[in-house]
Image (tube, grey):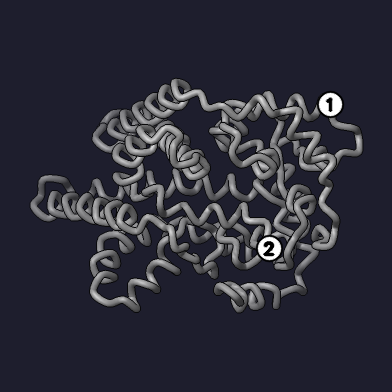
Amino acid sequence: MNAPSPNTAPDRFALDAMRRLVADLFAYRPALYWIDFVLSAGLGYALALAYLTGSGPAWAQALAFVGAGVLLFRAGTFMHEIVHMNGQAMPGFRLVWNLTYGIPLLMPSLMYRNHLDHHNINRFGTPQDGEYLPLGSAPTGETIKYLLQVPILPLLAVLRFLVVTPLSYLHPGLRRWVMRRASSYGSNPYYQRQVPADEPLALWALQEWACFAWLAFLASLFATGALPWALLGKVYLLMSFAIGLNWLRNLAAHKYVNTGERMSLQGQLEDSINITGQTWLTALLFPIGLRYHALHHLFPAMPYHSMGEAHRRLMAQLPPDAAYRVTDHPNFFAAVSQLWRGARQSAGNGALMQTWRRLGAPGG
């Protein structure tokens, strides 16, 4: 499988035509956001409590575990929407999400502002993109290594906020390293975050210290025996499951075949994927509009509740040879099978990740 050519000219006419077709679909519906988040998080927390404290039959515990993981994953994906909202859009929602979900689950929204690099036309698909690895052009071992990260991610989050946060404020050099290398949620371990001059560092510090205080409070409960240590293992399993759902979903977001060169807008579109099959797995793995990932890369500011209608309009009115149509995949398995075939055909391309690691630093 070949990467989209970085020299392919952007199909500006098609993009302009698509924008006109969906121009009325960018208004937020705040009530829907609130209802969706409150129900997802509320029921997710209730099921998590049933799983963590219950002593009923194993099947009931299993159902509570799966239900909690799926719903907490769904509630967490609102972070993606928050990052793309402009500063004036739904500030109350952003605040409540951080207070009730982002901080308690160690996912404050400022840790995901690096997602904007994923939408930067000069960085997408390169080592400077924190959410892109060339898994479709690298040996299969890289995909396996990617999946093996999941069990350590909850532990890294705890270490980041409970230990690294206070230490980072003791030395400017350590603080700079932490901001570059330990302050981003993404799948590219070689990515180094570039902190812009207008970054709200005071708000960033507030969210960091809030996570630290929450973890210190929980640690005191375990240390004093107010919470049993056995509970810690159950929490770890639940968090690993919820994170693992997102990690799996991410495999079907792109074809991941670009080998690091700058890509045209059309090349970025053709590397992205829409999952359009109406199956139960699609609903579980791709909440909050994530199934329309190619559409999202065309129109990052479009709210999730408009994406289904936007996709229907585009598929109905675009010409048969429109580049947008190649992004369509019937289900998760079709997308991942395509990635795996590309990886198997790239067995001799072992040096690719060495190049990726070398170029991961800003300006690399």
Amino acid under disc 2: Pro
Is residue 133 or residue 54 the one in the foreground? Answer: 133
Image height check: is 217 above or below 346?
Answer: above
Which residue matches tag 1? 317
Report which quarter residue 282 is drawn in: top right
* Residue 134 marker: 2
Q: Position of residue 125 (x, y in %)?
A: 67, 60
Q: Which is more N-terminal, label 2 or label 1?
A: 2
Q: State the image coordinates of residue 211 (x, y, percent, origin top left).
A: 27, 52
Count neighbours of disc 2 (C-alpha within 10 A) and say few if under 14, some if 14 to 19, many if 20 or more. Answer: many
> How packed is label 1: few (under 14 Cα within 10 Å), some, or many (20 or more)?
few
Give the amino acid at mark 1.
Answer: Gln
Check disc 1 and report its element: helix, strand or loop: helix
In the image, taking residue 324 as reference, residue 34 lies left or right, namely left
Q: Residue at x 41, y 37 (%)?
A: 72
Question: Where residue 353 sits: x, y (%)?
Answer: 65, 73
Task: Please determine whether, in this image, residue 170 is positioned above or below residue 146.
Answer: below
Residue ID at (54%, 33%):
288
